[in-house]
Amino acid sequence: MRLLLLAATFLALTGTAHAASYAGKPIRQGSATLPARVSGTDIQLAINGRFATRFWPGVNLGVTVPGHAPGELAPTRKDYDRWLAGMQDLGVRVVRVYTILRPRFYEALAAHNRRHPKTPLYFIQGVWIPEERFLATQNAYAVTAEFDQEITNAVRVVHGDATIAPRRGYASGRYRTDVSRWLLAWSPGVEWDPRAVEGTDAINAGAPPHAGRFIQSTPDATPMESWIAARLDHLATLEARQDWSRPITFTNWLTTDPLPHPMEPLFEIEDRISVDAKHVQATAQWPGGFFASYHAYPYYPDFLRFEYEGGQPSPYAAYLRQLRQHHAGQALMVTEFGVPTGLGAAHRGPGGRDQGDHDERAAARIDAAMMREIEQAGYTGALLFEWTDEWFKRTWNTQDIAQPVDRRPYWHNVLTNETQFGVVAVEPRTPAWGNARVKHDAAYLYLKARNPSTIEIDVRPTPGPDLRVIVGPGKQARFEIPSGADPIPSVFGVGQRPEPWVSPRLILSRPLTIPTTGQTIPPEFLDLGTLRWGGSDVRRLAAGSGKTAEIRVPWLLLGFADPSSRTIYTPQPTGVTFSRVTGVTIDGRRYTWSRWNEVRWHERRKQGWNTLKAAFQRAVH
């Protein structure tokens, strides 16, 4: 008996028995066709002539590849075919896209699902708002016409009946592939800027609730919430004209969640205002239903560190349960979660779930645990962020020195954590050593060094070296920079150090004060000076044995704001300045390279793949 129980447990954990079917077939209900619907706190799939509750483990798909800005929507059909096949192998059941993509994505999705009729890949379609104008006007109502047009285009795209003219920053082309049967849900919107939300409410004070035919807002809705309801009603109206109905939500995040957070140190930003999905409802005319959704990460905002400390099984899980209680009776999904891999970090999280500085296997274990916590808290789905690493991304503690912005896609800034959220790593192709002792790629400068030795690298046109690489003795190495080369005091006004040579670092938090207690928390930093040696940890920067070592130096740490154009940054009393150089001097020898405008890159499944695969398989039982 004990062996039988153990075997049953193993099968349940490995996902090799009794996996729930996702081979759905839309159901006709009155005048509407439904591929899925919201029922109470669930999102149910139309399958075998009835609706069956399913948990939706998924992943978010970005819009870029190296060398291209997001507005180019550059992935090819081969990229999409490869990515969708990878999702199939991982066990992903729904993929979320943020905006209208080029026709090749929808063509690839339809072809993929025809090849896999028993395990089709559903998708959630997002719709971008004109965010720059929204922020400039501080008024969502000012972008209504443009947003409604984008929604109109999105509906026609999904039904394979659109021809969109070229427009900078947007997808275009002839859309003739109908993928409506695999569209699980709509999710228009963005992570709402709290000041723009506040401006919208102030400018439109007294705006009545939206009394839509399909989607409405409640009497206690704010002007912003009523505006969102009206946009969703516009979307539902267009779908109804096509005789379709399906679940619908809007994008939201913890910064504008409806819960009070008295311990939030940055309450003027992170707890300033709320956008509450409880104030938006589907009417009986919209059988697809409405659900709430959030981007929910374990490290941000800071209230997660202070209010939920000691929560079980984690502070993140404790928050999820409280949010679930607020949305009692309403279906709820986490449409973004995860932690990034790699060397860079930008924030501490409780329980070691930091915003970066994770080995790939450790990050996968954290992501798998969070997916399980989301499911156990009664949510209807969990969508991991994201499928591939994206080089163009920015984060608060490196964005001021990684310049110019439009050249970020041409190099991989490994100190920016946001570039390394992918399940799949996207890495530059590195040239072979040959007889060289120095080489480079789009992520690092590589050095061959004697062990022990000290290498001095001169970057800026000021006297003295800008980086020391101290190797050995044995399997150890460290970086040192002149204190004046540390950009943190110049950019953030904290962390001045009197020593002439210091260890490089990243700032993780400015000084904080907890409102309820008055406790002051000093700024937090991540040391980058002590190099990890060898092994499979993606964060390692040194390797070798005996008398020779190989060192790789991240470009930003070396002083480069953009290696592709040979642009360096120089800290000043306030801020930094930028200039161009021809190369670097390494122990008196000049090393130069040509500027580049193209990138050679490859993909690699990260080392936590099998851990995530097991988590996805477990989630569909």
Image (tube, rainbow, N blue to C red):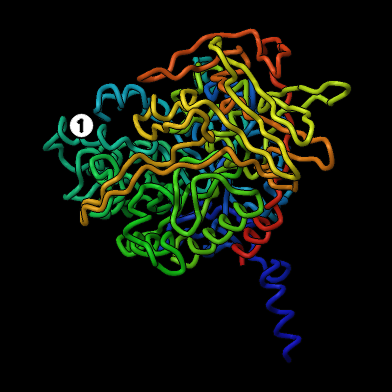
Q: Residue furthest left?
A: 206
Count of all numbered marks drawn on residues in the image: 1
State the residue in front, 294 or 524: 524
Amino acid type at image mark 1: Gly
Vertical order, 198 against 291 (above or below):
above
State the residue in front, 340 or 158: 340
| 286 relative to 26 in the view: left or right | left
Q: Position of residue 475 (x, y in %)?
A: 74, 45
Q: Residue furthest right?
A: 435
Q: Residue drawn at (66%, 14%), measured in percent from left and top?
A: 584
Tell me if mark 1 has few (under 14), some (14-19) or many (20+) residues whose alpha carbon lies within 10 angstroms of its own. Answer: some
Q: Quadrant of residue 65?
A: top right
Q: Position of residue 498 (x, y in %)?
A: 42, 31
Quadrant that contains the N terminus? bottom right
Q: Position of residue 270 (x, y in %)?
A: 29, 44
| 150 relative to 110 in the view: left or right | left
Q: Quadrant of residue 605?
A: top right
Q: Residue drawn at (67%, 14%), measured in percent from left and top?
A: 585
Q: Quadrant of residue 516?
A: bottom left
Vertical order, 176 against 318 (above or below):
above
Q: Position of residue 525 (x, y in %)?
A: 45, 42
Q: Residue drawn at (28%, 37%), measured in percent from left and top?
A: 194
Quadrant that contains the C terminus? bottom right
Vertical order, 461 against 510 (above or below):
above
Residue that label 1 marks: 199
Vertical order, 190 against 335 (above or below):
above
* SS under mark 1: helix
State the residue in front, 567 or 43: 567
Look at the image and tell me whether residue 174 can be seen: no
State the residue in front, 550 or 383: 550
